[in-house]
Image: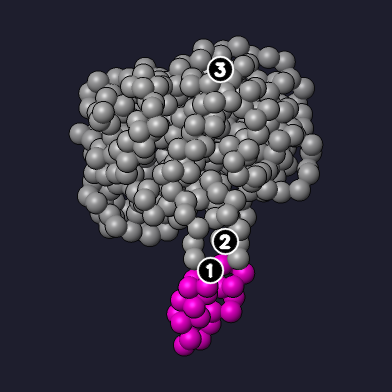
């Protein structure tokens, strides 16, 4: 079993924002065509890991000044276009399921884009349409904070799911054939979208709440709705979403860090870690979430959405070249070659194609 037979579509990677922070998206300063230890991701390691298609996250903090948000968003979209032009022998822009399959056949990585937060459209349907025209193929309706029109999983109640404008956003995304990403959304928002959308339900980077009770994860009831819709949950690698023990340890460490100051900071940290060893969390736990989603929703409704370069990854899944180890664990658990093909790319291609089939089917939604 090799990754060449199971090319991976990764639903979420934050390299663009991290590259922006480190090098201002200047590929001359930080070249993604060479191994870059400062990042979890580069084109070399994507190929080593068997990644055939990557959804690049286009993200701007929801706290950013709206005057800066447009430039920060567009600069990342432009960076993906430059990436594909500068390294066309390695990657090319993909806008559709057919494009992904063409890239697979050519041996090039398909570069797609997902907007990680509805705040970035600045409450404008025209901006949403322009971003789709620019190549963005999914939008996460919220990030960690509510928008004015949709509630986030990690914020207090706002509009109670979606308001009328939020319904218009979802209807427009269906009309465009754009994936409606429900990762980061409150349960009320997920339920509202489930009632409204004509496209398969889609989570770009989430886990199973039955295994780790975090609001960013997906309930079993929602997993059944995902299955009924023909949708997909792409499993995240962020340890706090994989293990409740790791989440509790991480919260305790963050609380303790406030006391690690002055010349004794390193010694204080070492002493705390000696008394509070990091709980195990890695490929085994990722595989547990993949297995659970398969068991509840079915083999056709699970994928991979790592969140590399947007988190501190597990020690044994530290960068994008480690996918073969994950597939080896699933192989050890008895996953067949056809099951692995569904997980790694087949399911996502089907969901994207089904979403594209919604395009042009406008519905009347009160603005």
Q: Which mark is residue 249?
A: 2
Report how far apart the C-alphas of labels 3 and 1 lie in the structure.
43 Å
Q: Are marks 1 and 2 in contact (CB under 8 Å)?
A: yes
**Image quarter of residue 365:** top right
Report crowding for label 3: few under 14, some 14 to 19, many 20 or more residues within 10 A (C-alpha). Answer: some
Reading the image, the residue beneath label 3 is 230
Report how far apart the C-alphas of labels 3 and 2 lie in the structure.
36 Å
Question: Viewer-proximal residue, 59 or 221?
Answer: 221
Q: Nearer the viewer, mark 3 or mark 2?
A: 2
Q: Nearer the viewer, mark 1 or mark 2?
A: 1
Residue 9: where, in percent of width, then height? 38, 30
Look at 42% across and 39% down and name the residue there: 56
**247 horizontally vs 267: left or right:** right
Element carrying mark 2? helix
Report crowding for label 1: few under 14, some 14 to 19, many 20 or more residues within 10 A (C-alpha). Answer: few
Q: Nearer the viewer, mark 3 or mark 1?
A: 1
**365 horizontally vs 139: left or right:** right
| Residue 92 belongs to the span the image colors magenta | no
Residue 162: where, in percent of width, then height? 74, 32
Residue range highlighted in magenta: 253-275
**Colour mapping:** one colour
Task: Name which of mark 1 and mark 2 comes first in the sequence.
Answer: 2
Report how far apart the C-alphas of labels 1 and 2 lie in the structure.
8 Å
Look at 58% across and 54% down and name the residue there: 245
Question: Viewer-proximal residue, 30 or 228?
Answer: 228
Q: Which mark is residue 276?
A: 1
Report crowding for label 2: few under 14, some 14 to 19, many 20 or more residues within 10 A (C-alpha). Answer: some
Please say whether residue 171 is visible from this viewpoint. no
Element carrying mark 1? loop
**262 horizontally vs 146: left or right:** left
Look at 54% across and 79% down and name the residue there: 260
| Residue 271 belongs to the span the image colors magenta | yes
């Amino acid at each position: 079993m090799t990754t060449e037979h199971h090319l991976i579509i990764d639903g979420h990677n934050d390299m663009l924002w991290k590259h922006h922070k480190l090098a201002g998206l200047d590929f001359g300063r930080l070249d993604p065509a060479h191994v870059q230890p400062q990042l979890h991701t580069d084109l070399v390691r994507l190929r080593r890991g068997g990644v055939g298609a990557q959804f690049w996250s286009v993200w701007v903090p929801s706290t950013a000044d709206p005057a800066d948000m447009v430039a920060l968003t567009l600069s990342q979209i432009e960076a993906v276009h430059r990436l594909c032009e500068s390294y066309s022998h390695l990657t090319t822009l993909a806008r559709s399921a057919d494009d992904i399959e063409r890239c697979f056949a050519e041996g090039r990585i398909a570069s797609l884009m997902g907007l990680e937060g509805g705040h970035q459209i600045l409450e404008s349907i025209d901006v949403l349409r322009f971003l789709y025209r620019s190549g963005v193929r999914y939008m996460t309706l919220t990030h960690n904070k509510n928008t004015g029109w949709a509630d986030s999983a990690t914020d207090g109640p706002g509009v109670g799911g979606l308001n009328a404008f939020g319904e218009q956003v979802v209807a427009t995304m269906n009309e465009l054939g754009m994936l409606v990403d429900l990762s980061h959304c409150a349960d009320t928002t997920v339920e509202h979208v489930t009632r409204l959308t004509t496209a398969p339900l889609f989570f770009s980077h989430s886990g199973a709440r039955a295994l780790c009770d975090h609001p960013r994860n997906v309930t079993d009831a929602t997993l059944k709705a995902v299955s009924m819709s023909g949708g997909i949950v792409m499993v995240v690698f962020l340890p706090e979403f994989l293990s409740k023990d790791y989440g509790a340890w991480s919260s305790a460490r963050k609380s303790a860090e406030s006391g690690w100051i002055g010349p004794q900071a390193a010694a204080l940290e070492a002493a705390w870690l000696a008394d509070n060893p990091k709980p195990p969390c890695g490929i085994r736990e990722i595989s547990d979430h993949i297995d659970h989603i398969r068991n509840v929703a079915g083999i056709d409704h699970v994928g991979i959405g790592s969140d590399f370069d947007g988190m501190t990854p597990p020690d044994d899944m530290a960068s994008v070249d480690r996918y073969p180890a994950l597939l080896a664990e699933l192989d050890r658990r008895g996953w067949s070659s056809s099951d692995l093909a569904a997980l790694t790319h087949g399911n996502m291609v089907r969901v994207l194609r089904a979403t594209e089939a919604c395009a042009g089917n406008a519905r009347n939604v009160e603005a």
